[in-house]
Image (tube, rainbow, N blue to C red):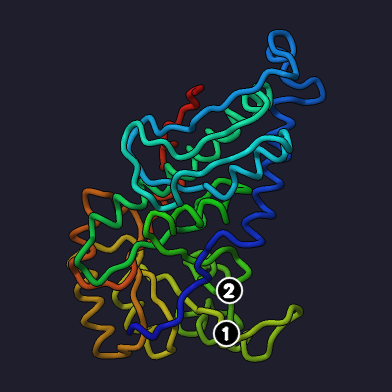
Amino acid sequence: MSNMRDFTQHHWQAKTERDFERLLELALVEDTETQGDLTSLALLSAADRGSATIVARTAGVLAGMPLVPKILSAVDSDLVWEPALEDSTELTRGTIVGTIRGSASGILIAERLVLNFLGRLSGVATLTKRYVDAIRGTNAHIYDTRKTTPGWRRLEKYAVRCGGGRNHRTGLYDAVLIKDNHLALGRQGEHLFSPAQAVQKAKELLRIGYAEPLDADSVIVEIEVDTLDQLREVLPAGPDIVLLDNMTPPQITEAIQIRNMVNPGVQLEASGGITLETIRAVAETGVERISVGALTHSAVSLDFGLDWK
């Protein structure tokens, strides 16, 4: 099934940068409003200059380096960034990731912005790497979810990629994912849609198109099922992916057997309550995809510091 389509995978690109610039604008206002840095205004002169290194205080995986020079430029165009590493690099305690040179007051204004952005994204990358390492050697791949920090989605999905994970759909607009709430509301006449009918309706929309231009052949159709009976019923309808919600490893193993007999071209995704302690058993069933909301909603920021040289 290596030729199966996948969701958009996030790299540092124009839309990622656009989202970051919006966040940076807000972050600058949070810190400086119109008054600036009162402490630096009181204690430093415009002539004071220096250099400082950004240092990892704990081990982890680096993510967010492309945003550092943009932060510095927004604070003070004379600040210079000298990166020492690239994203996805594994860090140990004390690793220097780069050096900032220029106005001392500018460095101090930029300090917390740089540390916060790097810390958040590197925390996501670090947790993702732990999940990826936990299933190494199996057939499964780790995927993120939409359980992201509002406004940070593309950045956090980029960080997941830095940690070796893969990206699920970016938003509601770029894939069909039929969940139990859709099935509970969608009606065909007087009756609720069955899973197979829902898949057929989604494919019909993609065939006829809608208000926005759409490459129907590139849009993935996925459906969530709670039981093996639902899986049996929906497989002939030909979804690209079936999400197995909160199933145990024995149930997932049986689901794979059913899929292989009925429609081996459909990929299976395990999801729901999967932790670092349980994910190996899930991956060893042979399931192709495992989605984990914790990659983004439960990541702890990596600790970075700024040291004057």
State the image coordinates of residue 113 (x, y, percent, origin top left): 60, 33
- Amino acid type at mark 1: Lys
Q: Splitting the image into 4 quarters, where does residue 186 fall?
A: bottom right
> Which mark is drawn over residue 91?
none
Front residue of 258 and 275: 275
Q: Is residue 250 left or right of residue 11?
A: left
Find disc 1 in the rendering and name its residue: 201
> Which mark is drawn over residue 186?
2
Front residue of 272 and 64: 64
| Residue at image location 41% in from the left, 77% down from the top | 241
| Residue at image location 50% in from the left, 79% down from the top | 221
| Residue at image location 66% in from the left, 35% down from the top | 79
| Residue at image location 25% in from the left, 76% down from the top | 255
Q: Is residue 158 left or right of residue 35?
A: left
What is the CA distance from the residue labelled 1 to the residue labelled 2? 10 Å
Q: Splitting the image into 4 quarters, where does residue 162 fall?
A: bottom left
State the image coordinates of residue 58 (x, y, percent, origin top left): 34, 33
Q: Is residue 168 left or right of residue 1?
A: right
Front residue of 308 and 136: 308
Element under disc 2: loop
Closer to the camera: disc 1 or disc 2?
1
Element under disc 1: helix
**Which quadrant is home to the N terminus?**
bottom left
Count of number-bearing discs: 2
- Amino acid type at mark 2: Gly
User: Is mark 1 in CB contact (under 8 Å) with mark 2?
Assistant: yes
State the image coordinates of residue 100 (x, y, percent, origin top left): 57, 33
Going by the picture, which residue comes out furthest to the right?
34
